[in-house]
Amino acid sequence: MIRILTNDGIDETGKKMLLDAGFDVITDKVEQASLGEFLDQNQVQVLTVRSATKVDSAVLHSGKHLKLVARGGVGIDNIDSETAGKLGIPVINTPASSSDSVAELVIAGMFSMCRFLYDSNRQMPSKGDTDFNDLKKKYAGGTELKNKTLGIVGLGRIGKSVASRALGLGMKVLAYDPSVSIANISIDIHGAGKLMVPIQTSSLDEVISNCDYLTLHVPGGQIVGENEINKMKKGVCIINTSRGGVVNEKALIEGLNSGKIAHAFLDVFTNEPKPDKALLQHAKISLTPHIGAATKEAQERIGIELAEKIIDHFKN
Ligand code: NAD
């Protein structure tokens, strides 16, 4: 029987599929320090993780029975794929399952910024009954998203899903992606079918210098630093749900302090799980703790996709 350790958990539907297919599924959470030893002693052949567990070289070398490492989610930067490759252990992920959830969080972040929701939520509990009228004045002057321009850098799965929602809200969408020249964006209108809207991509400079909101959906690497911020419109809002460092954090804080950037929304940080306090406590940053894919729907889809891929891998 093939033994699987789902170290960062797996949705019940995916777990049932694996059990029904005859796999032995261990759902214990093994601490990082003893993971290698656990894999070896329990003869674990498949290790599934999300983003919390690090599958580093030591873990891979200790898990002598490992035949597959599976990441529930997109980014595999917590897995040493190079070492896995050398040891002949394939690494798989579930890239499509979380796109809609991340896209919805991006839209939530934009609404949070344009109506000061995150700051209002910080102030109302302590001052709502004493300074109501002052707070009312402070949060007046919000703006609508309709007719604003959204710049999307990275027009892959998540970028397209964000584009679809933004178009549905009446935003203008500009996009940059070196591998895409034109993308057909599908807008699902519940009960009334689909509308296809073509988007022709532009240069990075054109996108960053013309948008009111900028959102990044690339695999990693710095896209926005001081130079790029200098080219942006005053009052731009920046959203990063892709990876910490895609927006340089120091340059972001400087841009917010100078007033060039109005607000930022961050779900990801360079130093997770201990992000820089200057970001966490900044009055103009709306924050979430890397929860882009953390919806019930996405986790169920991830569990199903993982189970299907694992079952398929051991089919013969
Ligand atoms: P994807 O592979 O479908 O799309 C990425 C796109 O970025 C590709 O089209 C690629 O051509 C483009 N790209 C690469 N380098 C670029 C560059 N320098 N400039 C512009 N475009 C570039 O990936 P996806 O499924 O859309 O996911 C995007 C990222 O979102 C992932 O890599 C992951 O880091 C992140 N993510 C975050 C969460 C979260 O919880 N916050 C969840 C899922 C994914």
Image: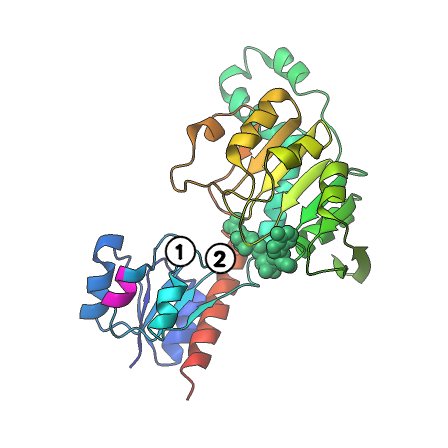
Disc 1 packing (10 Å; few <14; some 14–19; many ≥20): some
Magenta region, residue range: 58-62
Q: Is residue 79 above or below residue 120?
A: below
Disc 2 packing (10 Å; few <14; some 14–19; many ≥20): some
Task: Please identify the quadrant where the N terminus is shown.
Answer: bottom left
Task: Please identify the quadrant where the C terminus is shown.
Answer: bottom left
Whether 84 is among the magenta residues is: no
Q: Main secondary structure of the magenta part?
A: helix
Tell me how the rendering is colored: rainbow
The outermost residue toward the front is 227
Q: Is residue 81 above or below residue 235?
A: below
Q: Nearer the viewer, residue 151 or 308?
A: 151
**Residue visible at 65% across and 16% down?**
138
Compared across the picture, whether 96 is left or right of 58 comes to: right
Amino acid type assigned to the residue bearing label 2 in the image:
Gly
User: From where the camera sits, is residue 192 visible?
Assistant: no
Q: Of the numbered discs in the image, which one, if any, rests on residue 116? A: none
Q: Quadrant of residue 72?
A: bottom left
The percent position of residue 132, horizontal first and vertical second, equals 60, 14
Q: Quadrant of ligand 1?
A: bottom right
Q: Of the numbered discs in the image, which one, if any, rests on residue 75? A: 2
Q: Of the numbered discs in the image, which one, if any, rests on residue 78? A: 1
